[in-house]
Image (cartoon, rainbow, N blue to C red):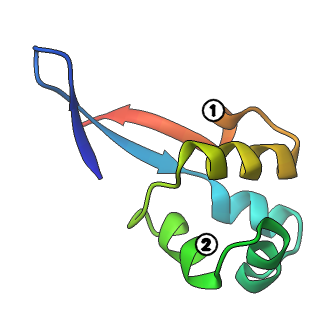
Amino acid sequence: MVCQLGSFGDEKIMKNKLKVYRAMHDLTQEELANKLGVTRATINAIEKGRYDPSLKLAFKIARFFEVAIETIFIEEKL
């Protein structure tokens, strides 16, 4: 998802390390989805960058892995 911020047209994209953290904890997409109360398709879409989670879900994911939200979700300039 691309969003423009400010009047200068700075374009940013959201990347994430969800797949890395899921693998570090030896969880399948299905297992993580069940623990977070979402579908496997949601986890898959987030990992592939096709879906940016709600702020509530992003915080839930960060709390689950006991890291800061910015550790998993990274905003980058295009």
Q: Is residue 72 left or right of residue 21?
A: left
Q: Could you classify mark 2 by the number of other residues whose Cα lies within 10 Å: few (under 14), some (14-19), or many (20 or more)? A: many
Residue type of the residue flagged with mark 1: Glu
Dot 1 falls on a residue whose secondary structure is helix
Q: Is residue 9 left or right of residue 65?
A: left
Vertical side of 51 occupied by 60: above or below: above
Q: Quadrant of the C terminus?
A: top left
Q: Position of residue 22 (x, y in %)?
A: 77, 66
Q: Residue drawn at (85%, 71%), measured in percent from left and top?
A: 35
Q: Position of residue 12 (x, y in %)?
A: 29, 35
Task: Farthest residue to the top: give it.
Answer: 7
Task: Farthest residue to the left: give it.
Answer: 8
Vertical side of 48 occupied by 77: above or below: above
Callouts 2 and 1 close, C-beta under 8 Å: no
Residue with the mark numbered 1: 70
Q: Residue drawn at (73%, 52%), measured in percent from left and top?
A: 61
Residue type of the residue flagged with mark 2: Ile
- The answer to which of 23 and 42 lies nearer the viewer is 42
Q: Position of residue 8 (x, y in %)?
A: 10, 15
Report the number of discs. 2
Q: Earlier in the sequence, mark 2 or mark 1?
A: 2
Q: Is residue 57 left or right of residue 62?
A: left
Residue with the mark numbered 2: 43
Q: Position of residue 64 (x, y in %)?
A: 85, 52
Query: Residue 11 is drawn in which quadrant?
Result: top left
Q: Residue drawn at (75%, 49%), measured in percent from left and top?
A: 60
Q: Residue drawn at (61%, 72%), measured in percent from left and top?
A: 43
Q: Could you classify mark 1 by the number of other residues whose Cα lies within 10 Å: few (under 14), some (14-19), or many (20 or more)? A: few
- The answer to which of 35 and 70 lies nearer the viewer is 35
Dot 2 falls on a residue whose secondary structure is helix
Query: Residue 37 is drawn in which quadrant?
Result: bottom right
- The answer to which of 73 and 36 lies nearer the viewer is 36
